[in-house]
Amino acid sequence: MTILDEIIENKINEVEIRKQRVSVTELKERPFYNRKTYSLKNRLTNEPGIISEFKRRSPSKGEIRKDADVLAITKSYEMAGSSACSILTDEKYFGGKDQDIIDSRFQLNIPILRKEFIIDSYQIIEAKSIGADLILLIAECLSKKQVMEYTQLAHDIGLEVLMELHFPEELEKWNPSVDLLGINNRNLKSFETGIHRSMDIASMLPKESIWISESGLQGSEELTALMEVGYRGF
Protein backbone atom coordinates (compact mmCIF):
# COMPACT_ATOMS: atom_id res chain seq x y z
CA MET A 1 0.00 0.00 0.00
CA THR A 2 1.39 3.42 -1.01
CA ILE A 3 0.99 6.49 1.17
CA LEU A 4 -1.62 7.72 -1.32
CA ASP A 5 -3.64 4.53 -0.82
CA GLU A 6 -3.48 5.05 2.94
CA ILE A 7 -4.55 8.69 2.66
CA ILE A 8 -7.52 7.82 0.45
CA GLU A 9 -8.65 5.04 2.79
CA ASN A 10 -8.60 7.50 5.68
CA LYS A 11 -10.30 10.19 3.56
CA ILE A 12 -13.29 7.98 2.76
CA ASN A 13 -14.00 7.56 6.47
CA GLU A 14 -13.33 11.23 7.19
CA VAL A 15 -15.78 12.47 4.55
CA GLU A 16 -18.57 10.27 5.90
CA ILE A 17 -18.09 11.83 9.33
CA ARG A 18 -18.05 15.36 7.86
CA LYS A 19 -21.30 14.69 6.01
CA GLN A 20 -22.98 13.77 9.28
CA ARG A 21 -21.73 16.94 10.97
CA VAL A 22 -22.61 19.49 8.28
CA SER A 23 -25.22 18.96 5.55
CA VAL A 24 -24.90 20.11 1.95
CA THR A 25 -27.74 22.54 2.61
CA GLU A 26 -25.76 24.09 5.46
CA LEU A 27 -22.64 24.35 3.28
CA LYS A 28 -24.60 26.25 0.65
CA GLU A 29 -25.80 28.74 3.25
CA ARG A 30 -22.28 29.83 4.15
CA PRO A 31 -21.26 33.38 3.08
CA PHE A 32 -18.47 32.35 0.69
CA TYR A 33 -20.63 29.91 -1.25
CA ASN A 34 -22.11 32.59 -3.54
CA ARG A 35 -18.98 34.70 -4.00
CA LYS A 36 -17.59 35.26 -7.51
CA THR A 37 -14.37 33.28 -7.86
CA TYR A 38 -10.98 34.21 -9.30
CA SER A 39 -9.78 32.35 -12.43
CA LEU A 40 -6.33 30.77 -12.40
CA LYS A 41 -6.91 29.58 -15.96
CA ASN A 42 -7.21 33.17 -17.17
CA ARG A 43 -4.13 34.26 -15.23
CA LEU A 44 -1.93 31.51 -16.66
CA THR A 45 -3.31 32.07 -20.16
CA ASN A 46 -2.09 35.65 -19.96
CA GLU A 47 1.34 34.85 -18.48
CA PRO A 48 3.20 31.96 -16.79
CA GLY A 49 2.99 31.96 -13.02
CA ILE A 50 3.91 30.41 -9.69
CA ILE A 51 1.42 28.57 -7.46
CA SER A 52 2.82 28.94 -3.94
CA GLU A 53 1.86 26.30 -1.39
CA PHE A 54 1.09 26.48 2.32
CA LYS A 55 1.47 23.31 4.37
CA ARG A 56 2.69 22.51 7.86
CA ARG A 57 3.89 18.96 7.27
CA SER A 58 3.90 16.15 4.71
CA PRO A 59 4.38 12.37 4.72
CA SER A 60 7.72 12.74 2.91
CA LYS A 61 9.18 15.65 4.92
CA GLY A 62 7.48 15.28 8.30
CA GLU A 63 7.05 18.53 10.24
CA ILE A 64 7.91 21.51 8.03
CA ARG A 65 6.75 24.34 10.28
CA LYS A 66 4.23 23.32 12.90
CA ASP A 67 3.48 26.87 14.11
CA ALA A 68 3.30 28.43 10.62
CA ASP A 69 1.18 31.59 10.46
CA VAL A 70 -1.16 31.02 7.53
CA LEU A 71 -2.16 34.69 7.22
CA ALA A 72 1.39 36.02 7.17
CA ILE A 73 2.68 33.37 4.79
CA THR A 74 -0.13 33.36 2.24
CA LYS A 75 -0.19 37.16 2.11
CA SER A 76 3.58 37.20 1.55
CA TYR A 77 3.06 34.83 -1.39
CA GLU A 78 0.61 37.24 -2.99
CA MET A 79 2.86 40.24 -2.36
CA ALA A 80 5.78 38.36 -3.94
CA GLY A 81 3.77 37.92 -7.15
CA SER A 82 2.29 34.42 -6.91
CA SER A 83 -0.46 33.72 -9.44
CA ALA A 84 -2.31 31.54 -6.92
CA CYS A 85 -2.02 30.00 -3.50
CA SER A 86 -2.39 26.28 -2.82
CA ILE A 87 -3.57 25.51 0.72
CA LEU A 88 -3.65 22.01 2.18
CA THR A 89 -6.80 21.11 4.10
CA ASP A 90 -5.97 17.50 5.00
CA GLU A 91 -5.27 17.49 8.74
CA LYS A 92 -3.99 13.99 9.52
CA TYR A 93 -1.16 13.88 6.99
CA PHE A 94 -0.48 17.55 6.21
CA GLY A 95 -1.58 19.51 9.28
CA GLY A 96 -4.10 21.48 7.24
CA LYS A 97 -7.60 22.66 8.04
CA ASP A 98 -10.51 24.35 6.28
CA GLN A 99 -10.03 27.40 8.49
CA ASP A 100 -6.70 28.10 6.76
CA ILE A 101 -8.57 28.80 3.52
CA ILE A 102 -11.36 30.71 5.26
CA ASP A 103 -8.87 32.99 7.01
CA SER A 104 -6.77 33.50 3.88
CA ARG A 105 -9.80 34.25 1.71
CA PHE A 106 -10.50 37.44 3.64
CA GLN A 107 -7.12 38.92 2.69
CA LEU A 108 -6.09 37.37 -0.66
CA ASN A 109 -7.00 38.72 -4.08
CA ILE A 110 -5.58 35.77 -5.99
CA PRO A 111 -7.06 32.30 -6.65
CA ILE A 112 -6.92 29.73 -3.85
CA LEU A 113 -6.57 26.05 -4.70
CA ARG A 114 -8.05 23.73 -2.11
CA LYS A 115 -5.30 21.10 -1.99
CA GLU A 116 -7.29 18.08 -0.89
CA PHE A 117 -7.81 14.43 -1.74
CA ILE A 118 -11.24 14.62 -3.34
CA ILE A 119 -13.15 11.36 -3.51
CA ASP A 120 -16.71 12.63 -3.04
CA SER A 121 -18.87 15.39 -4.54
CA TYR A 122 -19.50 16.66 -1.00
CA GLN A 123 -15.91 17.94 -0.84
CA ILE A 124 -16.47 20.08 -3.94
CA ILE A 125 -19.46 21.85 -2.37
CA GLU A 126 -17.36 22.17 0.78
CA ALA A 127 -14.50 23.77 -1.18
CA LYS A 128 -16.78 26.50 -2.51
CA SER A 129 -18.25 27.11 0.94
CA ILE A 130 -14.85 27.83 2.52
CA GLY A 131 -13.73 30.27 -0.20
CA ALA A 132 -11.70 28.19 -2.65
CA ASP A 133 -11.54 29.10 -6.35
CA LEU A 134 -10.40 25.78 -7.73
CA ILE A 135 -10.08 22.16 -6.68
CA LEU A 136 -7.58 19.37 -7.25
CA LEU A 137 -8.67 16.08 -8.83
CA ILE A 138 -5.99 13.39 -8.56
CA ALA A 139 -6.45 11.05 -11.53
CA GLU A 140 -4.97 8.05 -9.74
CA CYS A 141 -7.74 8.24 -7.12
CA LEU A 142 -10.67 8.63 -9.51
CA SER A 143 -12.32 6.97 -12.48
CA LYS A 144 -12.73 8.72 -15.82
CA LYS A 145 -16.45 9.06 -15.06
CA GLN A 146 -15.76 10.65 -11.68
CA VAL A 147 -13.34 13.17 -13.21
CA MET A 148 -16.01 14.19 -15.71
CA GLU A 149 -18.82 14.39 -13.13
CA TYR A 150 -16.74 16.25 -10.56
CA THR A 151 -15.51 18.71 -13.17
CA GLN A 152 -19.07 19.44 -14.24
CA LEU A 153 -20.18 19.96 -10.65
CA ALA A 154 -17.23 22.28 -9.99
CA HIS A 155 -18.08 24.36 -13.04
CA ASP A 156 -21.77 24.48 -12.08
CA ILE A 157 -20.87 26.22 -8.82
CA GLY A 158 -18.12 28.44 -10.24
CA LEU A 159 -14.95 26.49 -9.44
CA GLU A 160 -12.12 25.56 -11.80
CA VAL A 161 -10.44 22.15 -11.87
CA LEU A 162 -6.79 21.15 -11.78
CA MET A 163 -6.46 17.48 -12.73
CA GLU A 164 -3.21 15.91 -11.53
CA LEU A 165 -1.36 13.06 -13.23
CA HIS A 166 1.39 10.83 -11.87
CA PHE A 167 1.62 8.47 -14.87
CA PRO A 168 1.11 8.90 -18.65
CA GLU A 169 -1.61 6.25 -18.78
CA GLU A 170 -3.80 8.46 -16.57
CA LEU A 171 -4.21 10.84 -19.52
CA GLU A 172 -7.12 8.74 -20.70
CA LYS A 173 -9.12 10.18 -17.77
CA TRP A 174 -8.66 13.73 -19.05
CA ASN A 175 -11.48 15.50 -20.90
CA PRO A 176 -11.51 18.94 -22.61
CA SER A 177 -13.62 20.52 -19.87
CA VAL A 178 -10.76 20.16 -17.36
CA ASP A 179 -9.30 23.65 -16.87
CA LEU A 180 -5.71 22.86 -15.86
CA LEU A 181 -3.55 19.75 -16.18
CA GLY A 182 -0.88 19.15 -13.55
CA ILE A 183 2.06 16.74 -13.71
CA ASN A 184 3.36 15.68 -10.30
CA ASN A 185 7.14 15.30 -10.35
CA ARG A 186 7.12 13.17 -7.19
CA ASN A 187 7.55 9.39 -7.29
CA LEU A 188 4.86 8.15 -4.88
CA LYS A 189 6.91 5.13 -3.84
CA SER A 190 10.35 6.68 -3.31
CA PHE A 191 9.17 10.32 -2.84
CA GLU A 192 12.05 11.41 -5.10
CA THR A 193 11.32 14.37 -7.34
CA GLY A 194 12.66 15.45 -10.72
CA ILE A 195 11.40 17.58 -13.60
CA HIS A 196 12.16 14.73 -16.00
CA ARG A 197 8.67 13.46 -15.14
CA SER A 198 7.14 16.67 -16.54
CA MET A 199 9.56 16.80 -19.46
CA ASP A 200 9.03 13.18 -20.52
CA ILE A 201 5.23 13.47 -20.68
CA ALA A 202 5.07 16.91 -22.33
CA SER A 203 4.80 15.59 -25.89
CA MET A 204 1.73 13.53 -24.89
CA LEU A 205 -0.23 16.35 -23.24
CA PRO A 206 -3.26 17.91 -24.98
CA LYS A 207 -2.32 21.27 -26.53
CA GLU A 208 -5.67 22.82 -25.62
CA SER A 209 -5.01 22.44 -21.89
CA ILE A 210 -2.89 24.62 -19.59
CA TRP A 211 -0.04 22.59 -18.14
CA ILE A 212 1.32 22.87 -14.62
CA SER A 213 4.51 21.23 -13.34
CA GLU A 214 4.19 20.32 -9.66
CA SER A 215 6.66 19.51 -6.85
CA GLY A 216 10.43 19.50 -6.56
CA LEU A 217 11.16 22.58 -8.67
CA GLN A 218 14.61 23.93 -7.82
CA GLY A 219 15.08 27.23 -9.62
CA SER A 220 14.71 29.49 -12.63
CA GLU A 221 16.71 27.24 -14.99
CA GLU A 222 14.24 24.41 -14.48
CA LEU A 223 11.27 26.73 -14.93
CA THR A 224 12.75 28.09 -18.15
CA ALA A 225 13.25 24.56 -19.49
CA LEU A 226 9.66 23.67 -18.61
CA MET A 227 8.29 26.83 -20.25
CA GLU A 228 10.16 26.00 -23.43
CA VAL A 229 8.18 22.75 -23.78
CA GLY A 230 4.84 24.37 -22.99
CA TYR A 231 4.26 24.58 -19.21
CA ARG A 232 2.51 27.70 -17.90
CA GLY A 233 2.24 27.09 -14.14
CA PHE A 234 4.73 25.92 -11.54
Image: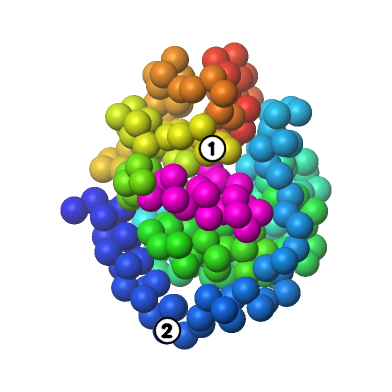
Residue at (51% x, 48% y) in the render: 151
Count of labels shown? 2
Residue 97 horizontal side relative to residue 105, left or right = left
Predominant SS along the magenta part: helix
Packing grade of label 2 (10 A; few <14, some 14-19, many >=20) is: few
Q: Identify the amino acid type marked 2.
A: Gln
Residue numbers of the magenta segment: 146-162
Res 199 seen here = no
Q: Is residue 64 left or right of residue 82?
A: left
Kindly identify the residue that appears in the image at 56 percent across and 28 percent down.
209
Q: Quadrant of residue 222?
A: top right
The type of residue carrying mark 1 is Ser
In the image, taking residue 35 as reference, residue 165 lies left or right, namely: left
Of badges 2 and 1, the one in the foreground is 1
Quadrant housing the C terminus: top right
Secondary structure state at the residue bearing disc 1: loop
Image vertical order of residue 217 relative to residue 52, above or below: above
Where residue 219 sits, quadrant-wise, is top right
Q: Which of these two is toward me, 123 or 84?
A: 123
Q: Position of residue 69 (x, y in %)?
A: 66, 66
Q: Nearer the viewer, residue 29 or 44?
A: 29
Residue 194 rendering spot, x and y as whole percentages: 42, 29
- Residue at the spot x=52%, y=49% of the render? 152
Residue on which the image places disc 2: 20
Residue 122 position in % (x across, y down): 47, 67
The secondary structure type at the circle numbered 2 is helix
Instruction: Residue under label 1, please give it.
Output: 177
In front of the other: 117 or 67:
117
Residue 27 percent location from the top left of the image: 59, 76
- Tell me if I can see residue 44 in this picture: yes
Q: How would you rate the neighbour count of disc 1 (Cα within 10 Å): few for under 14, some for 14-19, many for 20 or more?
A: some
